[in-house]
Structure formats: structure tokens, C-alpha cells
Amino acid sequence: MIDLYTWTTPNGRKISIALEELGLPYDAHAVDIGKDEQFKPEFLKISPNNRIPAIVDRDNELSLMESGAILIYLADKTGKLLPKSGEARYRVIEWLMWQMGGPGPMLGQVHHFVKFNAGKAPYAEERYVKEAHRLYGVLNKRLDGREFVADEYSIADIAIWPWLARFEWQTIDMKQYPNVKRWYETIAKRPAVQRGYHVPKHTGEIPMP
Ligand SMILES: N[C@@H](CCC(=O)N[C@@H](CS)C(=O)NCC(=O)O)C(=O)O
């Protein structure tokens, strides 16, 4: 049994989607970051960076923060969604790390400046929207002639997809990126994604381009 500490955000959804895909039993605990619950001392014991998501694996009492580390752990635990060795493994990790350093922080800045603080910092809005388009372009190229970012559906797709589910906040017209749109729609149809998206609570349907 896994305890998942999460909220209705892209980083949180990565893990609930992965748990659903892997068929691992879990209990979801809501950490309302709008109410600063991520700063509670009991949460800081498992997530010292005061951010969701975090997990505790009750099989061995291992606690982990950082969504990339959690995805690798869950994939290794089950032997699914991440090849065990060789180039195939490192391709998945490569695109997982691309998400952790690119779409995660950069699209997060778009949400901050464009969605929640529009008009306050025109330079930042322009900079991060431009970076968002660059990242969508990189992904569009990667998905040219390829169904998923690595050879098979993997934790890399699961890490990237929830960030792109906020394409409307990012003022991105996904039709400009047809390979991304096809990939996004394919993943959105997966039953595990449809279940994992609504953890820890339902906040609306999955946005479709
Ligand atoms: N690199 C971290 C980022 C986690 C993160 O930024 N989580 C956000 C929600 S998506 C959060 O907990 N924010 C609370 C805060 O900023 O205090 C990961 O991938 O797990």
C-alpha cells in the first residue's frame, strides 16, 4: 500500500496517474497547498522541500519527495513503464529529466505570470510564453513519427502530459503542434489517466484541444 500526498496540480497528477497505470493500491491524502498545508511539520518530515507530491511506501516505510524520483521508484518497484536497462531506459530518463527541468518550471512560470498575474510583468509574460512555445516545439519534433516520447508509453509521457493539460492557461493553441495534439489526445483517452486526473478530488473534466 502506498500513501500518496498530493493536490490537484500537474506534479500531483503525475503520481496518481502512474499509480493507476501500475495498478498499485494507494491511499490519496489531500495536501491543500492553497491553505499552506504543505508547511505542516508532519508533511515536512516526508517532503522537506514543502512541496507535493510525496509518497510513503508502507511495504518498506520508504518516503520520497520529488515527482521524478517517485516515478522512477514506482516503475522500478513494478518493472513497468521504464525499461530495466540499456539505451531504452536512459531515453525514458532523458525525457523525464527534460520535463523536470523544462515544462515543469517554465510552464509553472507561465501560469504564475500569464494566468494569475497578467499585466504585472510584461517582460516575464513574453519570456515564459516564448519558452512555452519553444518547449511545445521540441516535443512536437520529438513526436514526429513516434507514438510516445520514448519507444513505448512510459513515465516520461506521464510526467509531461499533466503539464500540457493546462495548455489553456498557457495560451497555447495545440493545433499549432499537431504531433503534440495527437499524443495528448491518445493519452487523455487512457482509463488510468482519466481516473488519476481526478485525484485527490474532481475539479473539472480533462481539457481537450
Ligand atoms: N520538482 C518538484 C516540484 C513540486 C511542486 O512544485 N509542487 C507544487 C505543486 S505542483 C507545490 O507543492 N507547491 C507548493 C508551494 O509552492 O509551496 C516535483 O516535481 O515534485
Image: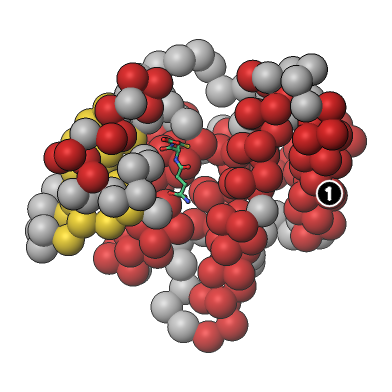
* Residue 50 picture location, percent across and down: 33, 43
Element marked by disc 1: helix
Snapshot quadrant of residue 177:
top right
Residue 93 appearing in the image: yes
Q: Looking at the picture, does residue 39 appear above or below residue 73?
A: above
The residue positioned farthest toward the top in the image shown? 204
Mark 1 residue crowding within 10 angstroms, few (<14) / some (14–19) / many (20+): few
Q: Quadrant of the C terminus?
A: top right
Seen from the viewer's position, the closer of residues 152 and 164 is 164
* Residue 5 picture location, percent across and down: 27, 38
Q: Looking at the picture, does residue 113 appear above or below residue 119?
A: below
Q: Residue at x 56, y 77 (%)?
A: 90
Residue 173 appearing in the image: no
* Residue corresponding to mark 1: 134
Seen from the viewer's position, the closer of residues 13 and 206 is 13
The residue positioned farthest toward the bottom in the image shown? 86
Count of all numbered marks drawn on residues in the image? 1
Q: Is mark 1 within 8 Å of ligand 1?
A: no
| Residue 206 falls left or right of residue 106 | left
Residue kind at label 1, given as amino acid type: Arg
Q: Residue at x 66, y 53 (%)?
A: 102
Snapshot quadrant of residue 37:
top left
Seen from the viewer's position, the closer of residues 96 and 191 is 96
Snapshot quadrant of residue 173:
top right
* Residue 66 picture location, percent across and down: 39, 54
Q: Residue at x 84, y 27 (%)?
A: 122
| Residue 181 falls left or right of residue 96 | right
The residue positioned farthest toward the right in the image shown? 176
In terms of image quarters, where does ligand 1 lie?
top left
Q: Residue at x 59, y 46 (%)?
A: 104
The way the protein has been coloured in the rendering is secondary structure
